[in-house]
Amino acid sequence: MEQSNDWVQMVIEVTKDAQEQGSDPHVWAMQLSKFLNSEGVSLPSIEVAEALVSYICWDNNVPILWKFLDKALVLNIVPPLLVLALFSTRVIPSRRHQPAAYRLFMELLKRHAFTLKSQIKGMNYQRVMQSIDTILQLSQIFGLKTSEAGTIVVELIFSLVWQLLDASLDDEGLLELTSEKRSRWATNPQDMEIDGHDKYDEKQSECHERMQKFNTLMAIELIGQFMQNKVTSRILNLARQNMSSHWKGFTQRLQLLQANSSALKNAEITPEALLQLASNSHIVSQEIRLKSRLNSNDIVVIGALSSSTSLCNGASHSDHWLPLDLILEDAMDTKEVNVIGAIETITGLIKVLKAINCTSWHNTFLNLWIATLRLAQRGRDSIYTPRFRLDNRFCTLLCIITLVVADFIDEEESAPLDETEYGSTSSWKEKSVPGKCRNELASSLQMLGDYKGLLIPLKSTVSAANQAAAKAVFYISGVDIENTNLECISMNHMPANCAGNMRHLIVEACIARNLLDTSAYFWPGYVNGKIDQIPVSLPGQVPGWPSLMQGESLTPVMIDALVSTPASSLAELEKIFEIAVNGSNEEKISVAKILCGASLIHGWKVQEHTADFIIRLLSLPAPADYSGRESHLIGYAHMLDILVLGITSLECLQLFSLHGLVPHLACSLMSICEVFGSCVSNELCTAATGEKISAYSVFSDAFTLLLRLWRFYHPPIKLRTGIVIQIEFFQTPEYLLLLRNFYLLSHGRNHQSRNKRRHKAVARSLSPHPILICTFPKMRDWYQQHSASVHSTLSGLVVEAHVHQIVDALLGMMFRGSQSLHSVSSGSSVRGPKDEDTFLRLNLPAWNILEAVPFAVEAALKACANGRLSPRELSTGLKMLCNFLPASLSSIVSYFSSEVCRGVWQPVSMNGTDWPSPDANLSDVEEQIKKVVAATGVDVPSTASAGSSAPTLPLPLAAFVSLTLTFRAVESPLYLAIPALEFIAAGSPWPCMPIVASLWCQKVKRMFDYFVFSASRTVFLQNHSAVVKLLQSCFTATLGINSSPISSNGGVAVLLGNGLKFPFNDWSPVAPGILFLHAIRSLKGTILIAEDILSLLMHSVREIACSGLHRETLEKMKSTKNIVRSGNVSFAAALARVKLMASLGASLVYICGGFSLVQPLFKETLTSWLISPHSSELEGRSEGMVEVLMGYALAYFAFLCGAFGWGVDSASHASNWRHDILKCHMKFLANALDGKISLGCHRATWHVYVSEFLSLMTDCAPTWVLNTDVNALKSISRGLKQWNNEKLALALLVISGAGNMGAVAEFIIENAL
């Protein structure tokens, strides 16, 4: 240290001697440099800089020393940035006393603050920046944890500009107008202990004052230069992005300067321009990202240009929203109960499509309405029981979509005004303008009126549409209809041409949710004509919701009216719920009937609230004065049973699924099952009708509904002919409860949407605390037994003695009068006639009986297999068991499913003697199946048995189908049994499913079409080639390049057709998309599907290339540069079609497996394709169009798969999975760019894939970049730089977060970007 002080003192002595002698600055600098070299001092020297600045300030503030210092800077003796930092702490506070020094300091800023490249490459760069951080305390001021040199550069530039700004404000007396009344920097002499201020008298000369004013003007212009310079403006942009709170204070002061500064009026830069520079700096990174796609390299140019034109103004505009049509149609399948609601799914999908299609909110909403109207129109005359099919579609159109729109509007209007693009890292968002989203919703609905064909109301909505139109007519006519019953209005009461359509219903649904106001009634063409008064023929006030709100009681007539008429407002539902909470048991029962009536099915204005109130009623808290030992729920038995039965239908359960309420419903049902399944006394109460309400019935209804909420009869791994199907076992009771707890505990900005706030409120109404499966011990024990029986045979399970006794009792009850049956207990036998007290001994809790059911079923099945029990006796006994405890059907289903899967039972002959015969219409079913799949080119195997033998089924399947045939077609147990029967039969060898379909078609002829279509999907489960042909038909139909039995135009209309609406027993080819959506249910989760889709996508690219260009055009474009620079129209059109195919492929992958299939796609499928060689079908070109198009196809396919699975932001549940998968893929890209991995694909394909995939990430999903490893990003950026794609590399780093800010700053400086 003493030696250091010695040579530093020598520096001062040398400088002092040169000063006294008036030496030439260059001579002094050379002498000093020679001396420092002799002392072994590394240059530039931090110590010399500190010594010289301290020497100058302020005892030696003379011109020659400033010249010495300038020469030291030029010759790299001292680090410029450190000198600037040191002077900023001394000169700026003393600028009024030292105006010449302040001017010289700003001259040094001009010379050295804009030449950063040489400085970050210099010696001691890291030490210099650390010294600057220590001197200015930048890390403490800005609160950044990192101390990287590049980060300190950003902080330094930002601080220097801010100090100049505060100094200028202070000089003009404006600093007092700020909220802090002072600067955070030392801008006045009193802020620091500085000597030498007495050098000037307090009364300054006129020249001195002029210099001060000139300095203020110079400082303001220097601020403008920092914002105009290419490099420093980018650095300031980094400060804005990663230090938004500090930037907000900076811009507020800049606005104050712009509005009040007199010096600014005389500056070269105008006040408006200065403010514009500051306000535009946040657009820089977006500009970089967009330019990176337009100009990153020759390959990407035409891609981005064609993307803009084709996606926004293409001929087939609706095809760009094809994923939306597919996802909406997929959500209509009532065989699937999705735990994630349609609102969340569609919201995430819209974000993706809006970003990648570059559309405004107006176009986004318009396409959303059009797609959903197409969905509703496809439901006309559907074979799937038209009533509930249409109810689900209307729910989606009039409730789900309006709630999606409400979330978008709510998000925009609740966003902080100071939020920047980087605050949310979501580039798909437009600049927030209050009311813009709402206004564009209104404009989209006005334009929707031009789509007359889609707006034609379906038969079941004609009345409601007419009422909506009549309401608008009355309103614009000024007629009060507050107490008018619009249900009684007919078109005879209205002016001509006033019939309603689907738009009227949409507008009413939006008004009900405060998305629009009644000004919509005055839109041109919305309604025609006016009316002077209410028609006199209309009846007066009748019982209904208005009279209820006026205080009338719940009479039988009133109840019937409320059940059949949907509520129109939340206030009406709150009124009826209040009656249920505070009313008598009879009133609770009445309210249960009302809520499960029209308000749930057709109450599109309040449907979400109706479902919420039903869940709350299912979990009513105990009264304050309740003191009983039993659960208070037992007193609500009748009401609970009505509620459960009221929502057990397919249409109602699907509504809860669409609204995402399955986790909450499951939690309520578990509570009911736990209580009523433990009741010892079976009979609980008697209804007013005299019906006995038993614990078994309440338990069975709730338990059966609960099991339908997840695929409990699906084994975890299913083997079929040549295909391995992995079923992801997510929808378990534990998962449902965890999801419910997630909603309860959710917090933070990402969880503040209207939908998630509603979920949280519903969860809190059940319990303010998390609920785990251990809360329901009986349910937990049953589920553990169920899981064990699925994975192993019952003989391998250890059971207690009391279970054997119950089994014996059950067998005695089921087969009284039959031959001896041996239970699982060793040697004990049951003879029905001797056990007269069987029913008495079975007066046990339902959970106890349910535990024994699988063993009783196995004993009966073994007896049938051994000939000791006839098939008819088996079916009758099983039906008797179901009648005794309906919940037993669940255990029967689970047991039969597991046994069929194991394949250890011998087949039985369906000969019509022992077992029912399908021969009566099996050949008809086969013929119709062939017609259904005709468009796919798949051969349907024959259902005829070899020789003259009868068809056969595995014994468990034969027993199961025979049991289902004993039920009447309208019985509720079939809601559970039929889907399970279809699943089990579909997984069995051909022709099991056609046989099952034939048997049921004989029983219920009106379900012929339903079962034929269900059987047709199993054709694709028999061999892998059939699946590939089905997928190929989807690509061909969408592309429209080959002739098809349906159409040759391609697009959404051909892929999905017009739904399933064919006359009974007269099928035509089904649209391949519809067929795929139904067939894929049994193929979910297999990676083979993703590989097939990728292969077909690349085949489609070749087809597009071959059909889109003539041979002579191909010959002209033998290089990538020629392809792109030619701007060939055919290439742009081909690229648009490639992107359409990529969106189709990504949609199919997402539908097949969701985000669980995205992981192996990125980790295995994509990487395997890239490293494998691929032969081109078009010869004669080294870098041709096919290879380029393949790169685009792969990039869009990969990005969309990830975006659909994870979302483009962090709002999705699946976004937590994104980090590890993206990290792995980005590491692969980095290694490949570094040459560590050998690639097999074409070089042009690889270049386009990397460039376009990364461009899509930065432009549409910047949050993904935040999930990427920093080292991988740096490596990728280096690789892109080698491709002369610096701007994309910069764009990737710019949005990578504060942790990478230093690397980004250095990259900007090195490349002068």
Image (cartoon, grey):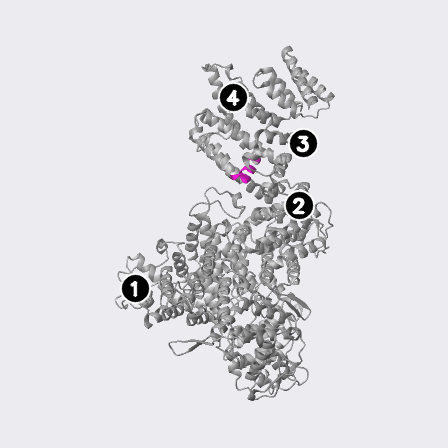
Q: Which residue does the numbered mark 3 point to in the structure image?
A: 121
**Front-most of 351 and 1117?**
351
Residue 1229: where, in percent of width, then height?
67, 48
Q: What separation in Å lies between label 2 and label 4 (alpha carbons)?
A: 47 Å
Residue 378 visible in the snapshot:
no
Q: What separation in Å lies between label 4 and label 3 (alpha carbons)?
A: 32 Å
Q: Secondary structure at mark 2?
A: helix
Q: Amino acid at mark 3?
A: Lys
Task: Give the residues in magenta.
Answer: 235-244
Q: Earlier in the sequence, mark 2 or mark 1?
A: 1
**Front-most of 56 and 318?**
56
Q: Residues within 10 Å of mark 3 (few under 14, many from 20)?
A: few
Compared across the picture, whether 398 is left or right of 741 comes to: left
Q: Amino acid at mark 1?
A: Gly
Compared across the picture, whether 768 is left or right of 1125 comes to: left
Compared across the picture, whether 547 is left or right of 1145 comes to: left
Residue 1084: where, in percent of width, then height?
61, 64
* CB atoms of marks 1 and 4 within 8 Å: no
Q: Earlier in the sequence, mark 4 or mark 3?
A: 4
Q: Earlier in the sequence, mark 3 or mark 1?
A: 3
Q: Which residue does the numbered mark 1 point to in the structure image?
A: 551
Residue 262: where, in percent of width, then height?
43, 26
Residue 550 visible in the snapshot:
yes
* CB atoms of marks 4 and 3 within 8 Å: no
Q: Earlier in the sequence, mark 3 or mark 2?
A: 3
Q: What separation in Å lies between label 1 and label 4 (alpha carbons)?
A: 79 Å
Q: What separation in Å lies between label 3 and label 1 (alpha carbons)?
A: 82 Å
Q: What separation in Å lies between label 2 and label 1 (alpha carbons)?
A: 68 Å
Q: Which residue does the numbered mark 4 point to in the structure image?
A: 94
Of badges 4 and 3, the one in the foreground is 4
Q: Secondary structure at mark 4?
A: helix
Residue 283 drawn above or below residue 333: above
